Structures are given as C-alpha cells and as structure tokens.
Image (cartoon, helix red, strand yellow):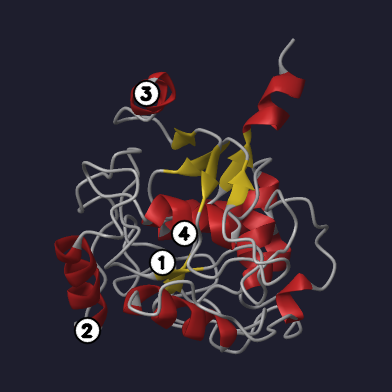
Amino acid sequence: MLALIVTLVTAAPGTAMASIPASNFNPPFPPSSGGQKEVHIAAFLIDRRPVTNLQFLRFVARHAKWRRDQVPRLLADASYLSHWEAPDRLGPAALDDQPVTRVSWFSAKAYCEALGARLPTEYEWEEVAAASEVARDARSDPLFRQKILAWYSRPTEALAQVGQSPPNIFGVQDMHGLVWEWVLDFGSVLVSNDSRDAKDGLRFCGGAGLTADDKTDYAALMRAAFRASLAARYTTKNLGFRCAKDTRALSSEAP
C-alpha cells in the first residue's frame, strides 16, 4: 500500500514521468520456459503521455541524422515522418500536441536514449496498460476489457491530442485508444527473471511462437499480433511511443 501511495504522489499531474514500483506481474504472454507465469519487473519510470510531434521536432532539430531527408532507409522506411509539412516543420497534418507517429523503432529508441532514457519493455508496457483509474490490474474487469476493445474497433480518424484520457492509477494516460506504441523488445518475449536482463542485440528480429496465458484477453492478442507484424524500420500512421527509465539509474546519478 505504501508503494502505491508513493507512486500516486510521484505521478501527480504536471510531472513528465510516473513512477512504477517493483512488482511480480503476470503478463499476457509469460515466459515459455519452466511453466513460469509471473515475471519480476524492477521499479521504473514511464512517460505519463506519448511523445508528441513538437517534442520529436525538437529532437530532430538537435539530431539532424533523424530528419526524414537524412535518415538511412535501413533505419526508417519511406513513410517516416511523411505527414510533416517539411523535414523541419510540422504543418497542419501534424499538430504540436498530437502523438508523433510514422516513426521507426530505431528513431524512437534514439529519441529516448538522447534523453538518458529508453523504450519500455513489453512487460513494463503491459503492466502499466493493465491498470485502470482505480485498480493496478483491471484485466479481470469485463467493463475495462470492453472499453479497450471498443477503442480498438473504432476506425482511425484524425489523432486527438495527448492527455485527453483519464489517468490510470499510476497517473499514466493514453495507454489505450490513441496510438499503438513501440516497445523495446517488440518482436520477442524475454525469458529472464527480470524483464531487462537481456542486452539489446537483435531482439527486435525475434518472434518465436507466443502462448497467451489468457486467451479471452483479445486486446492483448491484438497487440501481440500487431507487434509480431513489425520490423524495426517500419512506420505507420497510428504507431507512436513513450519513454521509460530505470530508477536504479537515477540512484546511481545522485550526488
């Protein structure tokens, strides 16, 4: 209970990141070895909202190699930031406070790393996405599941601004109903006891068979299918991202 109170205080409106305490989490797609269902997730921070067009524009202004007219096709496909008016200008089709989309895994990862952060792992993202406004894990609530499925079934129209949905119990917004989001290990499920023990390597090229722990969680199945269809250079009009950070990294940086 104390950890949850600390989380809610840390994730108060106005802060950029919410603090997620360490936990044992039962992910939708648990590790395939040894019959293990729970994974230990160390405490971490995660952006309260997806990264916006304006934030990403500032990033490419500082890191020109990620402009759409300079990025190698190995790192982003031809649709990368194609909805921006120019490589250095947003325009009417990409408003400041809309989530940035048409970004590749490589570019999203570079953005987070430029801030001393990283992309969240799949397990971290799923843990935060499992929370409702009143419960840390609301996946057994039929109304919560139905609301998410209703979001996913809506036709994609003009993207809303970030921060329009109510914050969940962690103080995080827009986990559902706005855009799909990149995760660090989108093509694989890590099998270590801690979801961040594995090194970067070529994880994004993984994609072994997945076994859902709860085959009635259709939203989780849809997310897994979408992630499995991706390659790291792909971009789409409804795929964005948010960043995460290790709290232990913050402790080591303290004076």
Query: In front of the other: label 4 or label 3?
Result: 3
Q: Residue furthest toward the front?
A: 35
For label 4, the crowd category at 10 Å Cα-Cα, with few meaning under 14, some 14 to 19 and many 20 or more, is: many
The answer to whether residue 67 of the structure is visible from this angle is no
For label 2, the crowd category at 10 Å Cα-Cα, with few meaning under 14, some 14 to 19 and many 20 or more, is: few
**Viewed as shown, does residue 129 lie left or right of 78?**
left
Residue at numbered disc 2: 153
The label shown at residue 90 is 1
Identify the element where label 3 is drawn.
Answer: loop
Residue at numbered disc 4: 126
How far apart marks 4 and 1 lie (CA) works out to: 31 Å
Q: Residue at x 46, y 65 (%)?
A: 89
Residue at numbered disc 3: 1
> Contact, CB < 8 Å: mark 1 with mark 2?
no
The answer to which of marks 4 and 1 sits earlier in the sequence is: 1
**Viewed as shown, does residue 157 lie left or right of 106?**
left
How far apart marks 3 and 1 lie (CA) works out to: 44 Å
Q: Amino acid at mark 4?
A: Glu
For label 3, the crowd category at 10 Å Cα-Cα, with few meaning under 14, some 14 to 19 and many 20 or more, is: few
